[in-house]
Image (spheres, rainbow, N blue to C red):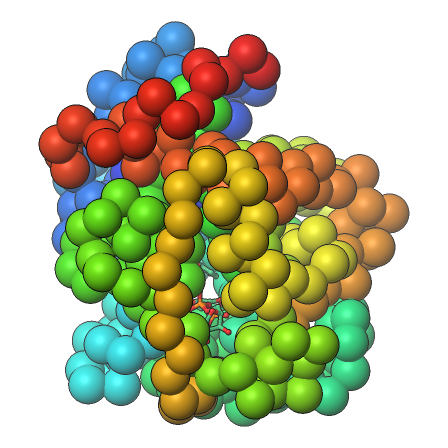
Amino acid sequence: MILITGGTGYIGAHVAVELLNNGDQVLILDNLCNSSRTTLGLIASVAGRTPGFVQADVRHRRTLNSLFREYPIEAVVHCAGLKAVGESVRDPLRYYATNVGGSVTLCQAMAEAGVFRLVFSSSATVYGDCPQMPIAETCPTGQPTNPYGQSKLMAEHVMRSTAASDPRWSVGLLRYFNPIGAHRSGKLGERPSSTPNNLLPYLLQVAARERAVLKVFGNDYPTPDGTGVRDYVHVADLADGHVRALEFLRGETGVHVWNFGTGRGYSVLEVVQAFERASGVRVPLSFEARREGDIARCWADPAKAARQIGWKARHGLEQMLEDAWRWQCCSRERGEPLALATLPATGR
Ligand code: NAD
Ligand code: UFG
């Protein structure tokens, strides 16, 4: 059985589906601070099997201890965490308490229970403003520009030191680049609880006419069209990578780091154009000043993941955007979509 912390969240839910499809038993722990119990039914309807669920905080040691006693947990995928960059600036202690404190408590409970296989949702943010593109795992970690990024880097340090202290640990640090997209069924995707910070959720709301205009933060970067360049990766590809990482770690010890990106960067304007092609919907834009803390460019060298765990992103940008738009259109909580008819039902 695999325990997924944060398993009702955007990425965790896709990992749950992938593990269930792989034949694994799945137990989810989530405090639902940024997700909903209804996701469990959606995971079940997509995967055909229901994961176990416990509503609890990952920092609650007694709950973790009892879970490890009660269930035959062999490994943990640790996705639980807070991820809003701006909020982390306003409320840093909450971010350190959850992202660092949660990781410490989880590692303590795992060690006590004799469970030493751990996969962690890390982030390309740990590289800071890396001068070298593409970014390989050998690039030194940098100075993340906000408490969220610092907390992810600190959590990596927690796991590295823990693994260094006991050779039974087998840890995978998965550095996601920019996860986007949604499950092809249209049932699982990212559901921002307030005004989205990230490009894709914001763009989707503009396309759905829930917001008037997409603000493009900066068109004077040293990039081909002046807008920021990122490596967008489909959440379904990420989920597949977690399964491969868990399998690899079964036969290994120590700490293993993998970049999860496609290896190709797209500018904000390229993303908008690709979205317009994929959806047939026009996205109004306005050009604004650069957003504080943003870097110009960031894309992965994903060769190590291909070599070691056989992982490669399979979805291209237009597919990611088509799946994201289907999710936006199908999302019941947001009411019936404006443009459902613009997309064909998925045949994949
Ligand atoms: P999400 O908010 O959708 O999912 C996180 C889940 O963790 C939520 O369901 C939330 O309720 C839960 N959670 C938060 N604090 C908790 C706590 N104290 N105890 C138990 N559950 C708790 O976010 P996501 O996009 O699925 O991200 C998952 C992980 O991936 C996070 O750790 C995030 O830092 C990391 N990550 C995300 C991105 C991204 O752009 N989405 C990029 C890099 C890394
Ligand atoms: N952007 C806009 N308008 C918006 C939102 C974003 O122009 O409304 C631009 C940004 O300036 C940037 C690009 O779109 O050039 C991507 O921005 P996102 O906010 O979507 O993503 P970031 O690369 O800034 O950060 C994301 C996550 C971080 C994570 C990082 C690397 O938010 O948590 O990817 O994984 F650390």
Q: Position of residue 220 (x, y in %)?
A: 56, 89
Q: Position of residue 343 (x, y in %)?
A: 43, 24
Considering only vertical position in the picture, is 124 above or below 282?
below
Residue 203 seen anywhere in this rendered image of the structure: yes
From the viewer's side, name the closer residue of 258 and 46.
Answer: 46
For the point 46% across and 37% down, the residue is 280
Residue 4 seen anywhere in this rendered image of the structure: no
Q: Quadrant of the N terminus?
A: top left
Q: Quadrant of residue 216?
A: bottom left
Q: Quadrant of ligand 2?
A: bottom left
For the point 22% across and 30% down, the residue is 337
Q: Quadrant of residue 261?
A: bottom right
From the viewer's side, name the closer residue of 264 and 125.
Answer: 264
Q: Position of residue 229 (x, y in %)?
A: 61, 71
From the viewer's side, name the closer residue of 110 and 23.
Answer: 23
From the viewer's side, name the closer residue of 181 and 78.
Answer: 181
Considering only vertical position in the picture, is 121 above or below 315?
below
Q: Residue furthest right?
A: 307
Query: Left or right of 176: which side holds 20?
Result: left
Q: Position of residue 279 (x, y in %)?
A: 46, 36
Considering only vertical position in the picture, is 148 above or below 335?
below
Q: Quadrant of the C terminus?
A: top right
For the point 18% across and 82% down, the residue is 91
Query: Left or right of 2: which side holds 65?
Result: left
For the point 35% across and 33% down, the residue is 327
Query: Left or right of 185: which side holds 57?
Result: left
Total numbered labels placed on residues in the image: 0
